[in-house]
Image: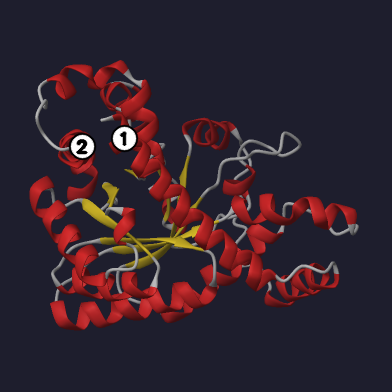
Amino acid sequence: MYIEELKFSLWADFIERDYLDCEFKELINRGIINGATSNPAIFKSAILTSGAYKEQLASLEGLSAKAKYEAVAIYDIQKAADILKPLYDKGDDGYVSIEVDPFFCDDAEATLEEGKRLYKEINRENVMIKVPATSAGYIAIEGLIAEGIPVNATLIFKKEQAISCAKAIERGLKKSNKNVDSVISIFVSRVDRAIDARLKEAGVETSLSGIYNTADIYSAIQEMNVDGCRALFASTGVKDDSLEASYYVDKLLGFNCVNTAPIDTIKAFDDNEIKEQTLPIDAALIKEHFKKVKAAGIDLDEVLDGQIEDGLIAFKDAFKEILDAL
């Protein structure tokens, strides 16, 4: 736990084999991170650019592209899970996430079956199966939780998505009769990147919409109080040079939540001496900001729906590029 009194966790949004053997262990030993996440884009970058995978890939000749990808990804996830296991054993998170095939995002049965298969093949209890928050995803999330499989519900931009995820987790828990951990991953900075240029033109303060949208969703998750379920803040790296590198971590410090961030962001946050609780954010303040967003001619629902669609496309594209290369 990065901040024990807040039950605030910091996870690394990065997986790469050489990194797991070196810096990953160092960050854990120093008490800076206590979990990790991955997605198709992260594995694409690792597998296609790092020489650490050449030997294993050479031994997988004759397998299908997806079988090669899974063999490589499963090896890394197992390695990360084993490194994190001592944290898991003492109740300090210790989870690593792997995402199901993003092309199954609209197929509940395929998502559920792949999630169960991956969890069984990885064979590590401190693994979370990552499922996009779509209509099909909610069904799969319920099914996985019912099987006692930890879930990372991902690609959340709207409060309605988060509530649907929490309800699915709650239904699954009733069927499982077990304590099963889960996180609901809210994407932050992408909202600002989508609308800040237009807000600036309209004279509305920028770099706040992602924070306020996330804060609103966080409060809804906290209110539902589903056993073992926490808000997780993703897409927290900074693209705007005018912002502090740790901006999206600093502004989202709250009780009982997780921030998964790129390594440079994590280091910047750890170097920052000021660590004050910033969540929850007053609902009236959030409402007032989004009134200004609307007055600037921006349909927030439309923007958020577009971000969900763009996110799914990006994960599919990254996954396809991996398979094509393999």
Residue type at mark 2 is Ala
List x then y, in percent, for residue 177.
14, 79
At which x and y percent is residue 131? 32, 61
Q: Of callouts 1 and 2, which one flags the residue occurring earlier in the amino acid sequence?
A: 2
Q: Is 214 left or right of 93, judged from the image as shown? A: right
Residue underneath mark 1: 324
- Element at label 1: helix
> Marks 2 and 1: in contact by CB < 8 Å?
yes
- The quadrant in which the C terminus is found is top left
Measure the C-alpha gap from mark 1 to mark 2: 7 Å
Image quarter for residue 268? top right
Residue 206, position as x, y percentages in the image? 78, 53
- Is residue 12 something one can see in this rendering? no
Q: Residues within 10 Å of mark 2 (few under 14, many from 20)?
A: some
Seen in the picture, residue 14 relative to 305 is either above or below; the reply is above
- The quarter of the picture where residue 211 lies is bottom right
The crowd level at tag 1 (other Cα within 10 Å; few <14, some 14-19, many 20+) is few
Residue drawn at (53%, 35%) of the image: 270
Colour style of the rendered protein structure: secondary structure
Q: Is residue 87 left or right of residue 137?
A: left
Depth check: give the residue in front, 61 or 90. Answer: 61
Name the residue nearer the viewer: 34 or 135: 135
Above or below residue 170? Residue 73 is above
Residue plotted at (9% across, 53% down): 120
Q: Is residue 103 above or below residue 280?
A: above
Residue beneath disc 2: 65
Amino acid type at circle 1 is Asp
